Image (spheres, rainbow, N blue to C red):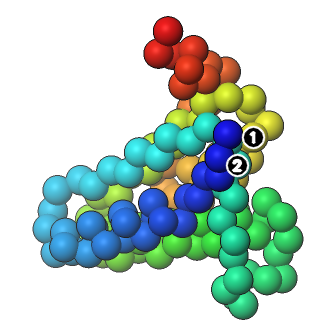
Amino acid sequence: RGHGNYLPAIAAVEELFEADRGTSHALSVILVADGRPSDVITDEKFLEHTGEDRHIAVMSWRLRRLQAALDEDMPRFYFFAIGMGAAKEFKVLTEMAEAVDRGSCSLTALSGRAMSE
């Protein structure tokens, strides 16, 4: 068991997709998680929120901002989330997918360990 930080993954996506501005091909993000994010969020814009709501606010805001930048001329940003484990662990992941126009989230009770056996 370890910590699962979502923000570094989103930051990497933002950096990678920066080079694709102005192109016309579809861009997809697939985020696979096995639990809740454990990022420490200190950005003052989001301090009014607490617990999971703070994670939802910041992650959703970053995905919507990315979508707006990439969809300037045509819709081309897609977000797919996959949660492996107990459904109660994936409120943030589900809300992230719902925050963007072309987002989806699939949850499975299988663990990564069970899938590899």
Of residues 26 and 14, the one drawn nearer to the viewer in this rendering: 14
Image x and y of residue 18, in percent: 26, 75
State the residue at coordinates (61%, 52%): 4
- In this orientation, does residue 105 appear? no
Q: Residue furthest bottom?
A: 44
| Mark pair 1, 2: CA separation | 5 Å
1 and 2 marks in contact (CB < 8 Å): yes
Q: Which residue is mark 2?
A: 36
Image x and y of residue 44, in percent: 72, 90
Label 2: how many Cα within 10 Å (few below 14, some 14–19, many 20+): some
Closer to the chain start, of discs 1 and 2, is 2
Asked which quadrant contains residue 87, the reply is top right
Q: Is residue 1 above or below residue 112?
A: below
Judging from the image, what secondary structure is the residue with disc 2 in? loop
Residue type at the position of mark 2: Arg
Q: Is residue 97 above or below residue 109?
A: below
